[in-house]
Amino acid sequence: MANASASSPMNPHFFQPLLPGFQSYLNIPMAFYSKHIKGTTDEGNANAGDKAVVKLRSDASDLTWEVKMDGRRLTQGWQEFTTSHDLRVGDIVIFRHDGDLLFHVTTFGPSCCEIQYDDVFHKSSDSDLAMNQETREAVSPSDKSCFVARVTPTNLRKDSLFLPRGFSRSNGLTNRECEIILLNEYEKPWTASLIYYKTTGDVYIRTGWRRFCRENRKRVNGLLTFKLVQAGTKPVLQLCSSMHNRDCLRTSSSRSQERFLTLTLTPYSLTKSKLCLPGKFVWLNGIENARKITLVDRYGVKRTTSLRPDNNYGAMRMGKEWREFCEANGVKAGESFTLELIKEEEEEEEDTAATHLLKFCTKA
């Protein structure tokens, strides 16, 4: 189907990050609604008491979803669109208004990379959607060797894990039924079964998934990244450690580029006394378990501050010392600055502890 650019200047756009509870409804921004929708012919022709209907399209398929609009709120039909597109908290959706209450929707993951869908895309049954939402491709379209799985009560009860269709097709796992080996981080093997369903084209890991989770103490809601390390007659999936996870999730950036982070001191940061390290930066540099970090200003002065999880997307919130750090570096509201993450080894009495430093580099 035709794929008009999501950034085309010919059509107005708005975007929304998906927050907890997004499946119930989505609000159209007031400024966009007032300028481009309110008072339009289609909306004005809705019968009294009736809700206007918007149509949603995407590059995932040729299907059109009809969603009722109650004022600025997208309601009935919106949940079906979100589940069909496997949308989750932290994703971003961009709406391009093509006129007559028709919107083209482009979806992005938390890493700000566009979500890639299978070539064949259809409306799924409720049971399919429930299972399919447990897994997702973990990387860019150029690398299909990894996927992320969530441990859920359903897949533990059914002893069954759905494999993303793009992952299965790219790695030759369709039209096959065989044994599959699951390795933990230490390369200890567990044997499971690979099952292919011809009617849906879906591939599952069966009879072995539950045991793997139980014996590796993987709890409900835990996120596990797997990498296919051998395709062959007996495929092998390895559970990634933190370092391997960073390898799986890496796109084209190099390790040196991953050490650098540019932040903007916004009025919101100052008002809420909140400055965070983005989840992707935290994950790629392996500091998701750190609970403190040292800030080094342009004069070499060190300030140790706390780190604590800020949201479900992996962001880490720094303690109050960041304010003094910004003042020492002359950073004011609205200005951006670049930091470099440095891992420093310090000898202690019995062992070696890793201390992470964030060093001020430059101000934009």
Image (spheres, rainbow, N blue to C red):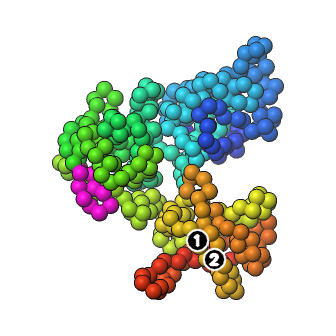
- Please tell me how crowded label 2 is: few (under 14), some (14-19), or many (20+) other residues with Cα within 10 Å: some
Where does residue 269 sit, x and y in percent of width and height?
Answer: 74, 61
* Label drawn at residue 304: 2
Q: Earlier in the sequence, mark 1 or mark 2?
A: 1
Residue 142 drawn at (x, y percent): 41, 53
Q: Residue 60 appears at what percent x and percent y?
A: 49, 36
Could you tell me the amino acid type at mark 1? Answer: Lys
Residue underneath mark 1: 292
Residue 214 % position (x, y): 32, 48
Badge count: 2
Residue in front for this viewpoint, 299 or 123: 299
Identity of the residue drawn at 54% across and 28% down: 80
Mark 1 and mark 2: Cα distance apart in space: 7 Å
Q: Is 3 on the left-hand or right-hand side of 217?
A: right
Q: Secondary structure at mark 2?
A: strand
Res 40 quadrant in image: top right
- Callout 1 environment at 10 Å: few (<14), some (14 to 19), or many (20+)? some
Q: Nearer the viewer, residue 294 or 257?
A: 294
22 with respect to 140 (left or right):
right
Query: What's the magenta region?
Result: 181-190
- Under circle 1, the secondary element is strand
Q: Residue at x 19, y 41 (%)?
A: 178
